[in-house]
Image: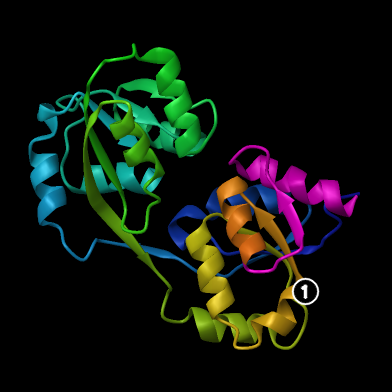
Amino acid sequence: MSRLGAIRVVVTRAHSQNQLLVTVLAAAGADVITLPLLEVVPPAQTDTFEQATANVSDYDLIALTSSNSVAALHTAGVDPKQAPPVVTVGPATTKAARQAGFEIAIEATRADAEGLLTTLDEHVDPGTSARVLLPQAADARPTLAAGLRIRGHIVTVVEAYDKRLPETARDDAHRLFGDRPFGWVTFTSPRIVRHFVDLWDDWQTRRSGLAAVSIGPVTSRALRAAGVTTLAEATQPTPAAMVEAIEALVV
């Protein structure tokens, strides 16, 4: 018998990033449907990012919090051989950085900003002041930048990319769900949570029909704030862990 028993799971991750999650869910027996609620676009202002990447050798470290940041550096023409070592959050970011040719100095033991700060504390001597480039999303949490500055590092924060709702997402979502309960839907960032909630004028009455699959605690907090009660949270930010989270509730 298939592990997920052919239950329907809607994957909302950006089209450019959803293939592995789709594959792993399908291999577990799920009936997978894609509904991308995010697409990655350049930031509204690019001057600061372009200036920082043109002078990337001026920094001691680059802090990378997503594979989108890696892609933005590649698009900007950053040569990994000329770049300083990188510190990374999460296995997907580490994999993308390694494949791009960057030297991995430190990988967070827990895949969030707090986890990276804790890992840095374990590897960097107190009192050390590093020049850190932090390319991130336009809506990124300030946690990592603030934590680095508190520790005495000189941090340059630049918007490397932004995210928006695809133009057809609202119509696609209403055709897909109609008036039926949502069932299982995956969420891989707080931004996707906000986009999903904003699709529905009757969210307060419909939210009880959602069984959410969260990639981690930050996304779970956004789901709970939106009033979601059926919530499966992955123990690691990986597709396999998201499948295991669903299994824990449906088996």
Q: Residue placed farthest to the top in the image?
A: 125
Residue nearest the viewer, comparing 82 with 215 = 215
x and y, in percent, of residue 116 in the image: 44, 30
Is residue 234 highlighted in magenta?
yes
x and y, in percent, of residue 8 in the image: 76, 66
Q: Is residue 112 left or right of residue 7?
A: left
Residue nearest the viewer, comparing 115 with 178 = 115
> Residue at the location (61% across, 55% down)?
221
Can I make out residue 182 in this image?
yes
> Residue at the location (29% across, 56% down)?
161
Q: Residues within 10 Å of mark 1 (few under 14, many from 20)?
A: some
Q: Is residue 228 left or right of residue 111?
A: right
Region in magenta:
226-251
Asked if 66 appears above or below 138 in the picture, the reply is above
**Three-letter code, disc 1:** Ser
Q: In which quarter of the view is residue 145 placed?
A: top left
Q: How is the image coloured?
A: rainbow
Asked if 198 appears above or below 30 in the picture, the reply is below
Q: Which residue is mark 1?
A: 208
Can I make out residue 3 in this image?
no
* Element at label 1: helix
Q: How many labels, in total?
A: 1
> Residue at the location (40% across, 50% down)?
141
Q: Is residue 63 left or right of residue 190?
A: left
Q: Is residue 1 left or right of residue 15?
A: right
Is residue 71 highlighted in magenta?
no
x and y, in percent, of residue 110 in the image: 55, 31
